[in-house]
Amino acid sequence: MSGVVGVVLVSHSAALAGEAARLAREIAGTGARVAAAGGTEDGALGTSADLIERAIAEVDQGEGVILIPDLGSSVLTARLLEEPGKVVLADVPFVEGAVAAAVSAAAGAPLAQVLSAAEDARTYRKL
């Protein structure tokens, strides 16, 4: 294996994306490739295809990238950058999905397995 699957967190908020990415990296460990793409280029609320594209390039090691958007137009913006088999969108809870994907990716799982781990986060119960 030459690398690990990357994870990009797409949020309307740079702060939210950054903190969720930090949490996922800290839980998953040093092998995790997680980047944040939050807000717009001028720091406002919103999403930016350019920021997402740069985040993909930052974490892409040739094994694929999972995009995890928070809500609304972040999903639509992330969809613009999907590439079947290479950059895939995960319809998962933002934080739980990010942590599950990062842990699975850091363990060396392939793209489909990382996506499945993130999707399993939908069934996590807290009580």
Image (tube, rainbow, N blue to C red):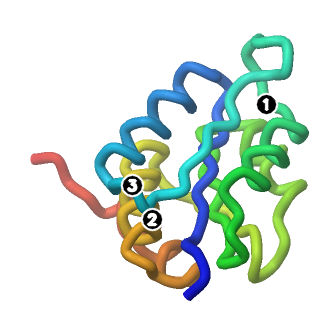
At horizontal 59% and vertical 39% (from top left) the residue drawn is: 70
Instruction: Estimate the spatial distance between the alpha carbons at disc 3 and disc 2, rounded to whole Å.
Output: 19 Å
Give the SS element for disc 1: loop
What is the crowding at mark 3: few (fewer than 14 residues within 10 Å), some, or many (at least 20)?
few
**Res. 73 image quadrant:** top right
Say which amino acid is labelled 1: Thr
64 or 112, nearer to the observer: 64
What is the crowding at mark 1: few (fewer than 14 residues within 10 Å), some, or many (at least 20)?
many
- Name the residue tied to disc 1: 47
Q: Position of residue 80 (x, y in %)?
A: 89, 54
16 or 63, nearer to the observer: 63
Give the SS element for disc 3: loop
Say which amino acid is labelled 2: Ala
Residue 117 located left or right of residue 63: left
Marking on residue 30:
3
Give the SS element for disc 2: helix
Instruction: Estimate the spatial distance between the alpha carbons at disc 1 and disc 2, rounded to whole Å.
Output: 21 Å
Residue 69 located left or right of residue 77: left
Q: Position of residue 44 (x, y in %)?
A: 77, 11
- Name the residue tied to disc 2: 118
CB contact under 8 Å: marks 3 and 2: no
